[in-house]
Image: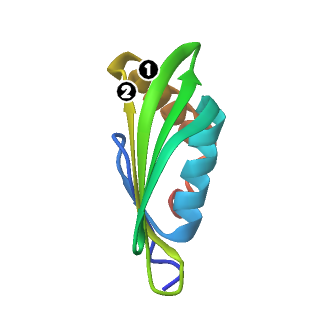
Amino acid sequence: MAEAVCFHSPVADYEGRAEVAHLLWLIASVVREVEPTRELVDGTARTSFITGVVDGQPVQGVLDEHYDEQGLLTAATLMLRPFAALRVAIAAMAAALEADPLPGAR
């Protein structure tokens, strides 16, 4: 089902394609200079290892994505480190969400 997308983050879990797309846009606005360093694909699961910059601090991360048989994204989990950069990202996302709430919260 196209709306059955779940995104897990250190902030909260989000469900529904519109909410997930909105949150991913916010994350993209916070994490800069993203470069994939390695990718593992196993059937309908993809794990991408990334590097980037958050507020001038280098970060490393892992993005896990799961797809259904039709190739639609059904779940994603993002992890970033170090924790100091993660806190900056969470604060920036929280501020952006206050300014422009998720579609489901409108």
Secondary structure of residue under mark 2:
strand
Q: Residue at x 50, y 37 (%)?
A: 50
Image quadrant in which the C terminus is located: bottom right
Residue 106 visible at all:
no
> Which residue occupies the foreground of this view, 26 or 36?
36
What is the spatial separation of the Cα atoms under label 2 and label 1, in whole angstroms?
Answer: 7 Å
Residue 105 visible at all:
yes
Q: What label sits on residue 27 in the rendered view?
A: none
Which residue is label 1 attached to?
A: 85
Q: Position of residue 59 (x, y in %)?
A: 47, 24
Amino acid type, residue under disc 2 in the picture: Arg
Total numbered circles: 2
Vertical comparison of 57 with 44: above or below = above
Amino acid type, residue under disc 1 in the picture: Ala
Q: What label sits on residue 81 in the rendered view?
A: 2
Q: Residue at x 40, y 74 (%)?
A: 43
Tell me if label 2 and label 1 are in contact, CB under 8 Å.
yes
- Which circle, 2 or 1, is nearer the viewer? 2
Q: Residue at x 54, y 79 (%)?
A: 71
Q: Position of residue 105 (x, y in %)?
A: 51, 58
Q: Residues within 10 Å of mark 2 (few under 14, many from 20)?
A: some
Q: Position of residue 62 (x, y in %)?
A: 40, 42
> Which residue occupies the foreground of this view, 19 or 103?
19
- Taking the image as shown, residue 103 lies to the left or right of residue 1, namely right
In the displayed orientation, state which residue is furthest to the top.
Answer: 56
Q: Residues within 10 Å of mark 1 (few under 14, many from 20)?
A: many
